């Protein structure tokens, strides 16, 4: 048994039937133009956005030499958001040979937990050759 239509349903169907084809074409056209404009504006607003490390990705030091942080730059939606970068594992013990990892995390709407890593190689650790081979494959 078919359900009886309510007055609201009948009125909606009547309005849809009255809609002129030109109205539908214009609605679709405006939607397409609006979407294209949104994509263009979004591209313009974010075209210079970046999250980059200053200096080298891999720093080589002699045992006892001091490590100087080169820093980073972070731009999101044309604003400097460098202050939102969190640096973890930033202890570099230059008194001992080793390969140290410094991780930079940008928690921002545009980059959503983006990570950058800098490696600090102190001296000539045993696994240096294997590390350099691995590093060559990641760049």
Image: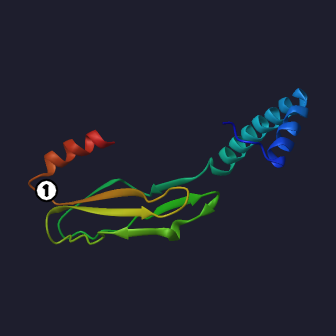
Q: Nearer the viewer, residue 91 or 59?
A: 91
| Residue 81 image point, x, y percent | 56, 65
Identify the residue shown where x is 16% and y is 62%: 98
Judged from this view, the residue extending furthest toward the top is: 21
Q: Where is residue 46 in the image (x, y as percent from the top left)?
A: 63, 50
Image: 44 above or below 85? above
In the depicted view, which residue is nearer to us: 124 or 45? Answer: 45
Q: Which residue, given by chain and number where applicable, does mark 1 sit on?
A: 124
- Percent from the top left, x then y, of residue 32? 75, 35
Q: How many marks?
A: 1
Residue 27 position within the rendered picture, expressed as x and y whole percent measured from the top left: 83, 36
Residue found at x 79% / y 33%? 28
Give neighbour class at mark 1: few <14, some 14-19, many 20+ (Cα, 10 Å).
Answer: some
Secondary structure under tag 1 reads loop
Q: Which residue is drawn at 14% across and 46% down?
A: 129
For the C terminus, give its image quadrant: top left
Would residue 67 be found to the left or right of residue 123 on screen?
right
In-image side of 89 versus 32 (left or right): left
* Residue at the limit of the structure toward the front, as seen here: 1
The residue sitting at the left extreme is 126
Which quadrant of the rendered structure holds the N terminus?
top right
Look at 88% across and 39% down and name the residue there: 15
Coloring scheme of the render?
rainbow
Q: Which residue is nearer to you in this view: 117 or 40?
A: 40
């Amino acid at each position: 048994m078919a359900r009886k239509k309510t007055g609201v349903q009948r009125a909606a169907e009547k309005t849809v039937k009255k809609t002129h084809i030109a109205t539908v074409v214009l609605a679709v056209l405006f939607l397409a133009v609006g979407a294209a404009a949104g994509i263009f504006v979004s591209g313009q607003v974010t075209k210079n956005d970046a999250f980059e490390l200053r200096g080298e990705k891999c720093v080589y030091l002699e045992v006892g030499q001091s490590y100087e942080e080169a820093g980073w730059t972070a731009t999101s939606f044309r604003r400097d958001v460098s202050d939102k970068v969190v640096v973890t594992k930033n202890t570099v013990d230059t008194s001992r040979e080793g390969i140290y990892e410094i991780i930079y995390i940008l928690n921002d709407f545009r980059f959503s937990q983006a990570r950058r890593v800098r490696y600090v190689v102190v001296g000539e650790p045993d696994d240096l050759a294997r590390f350099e081979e691995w590093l060559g494959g990641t760049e």
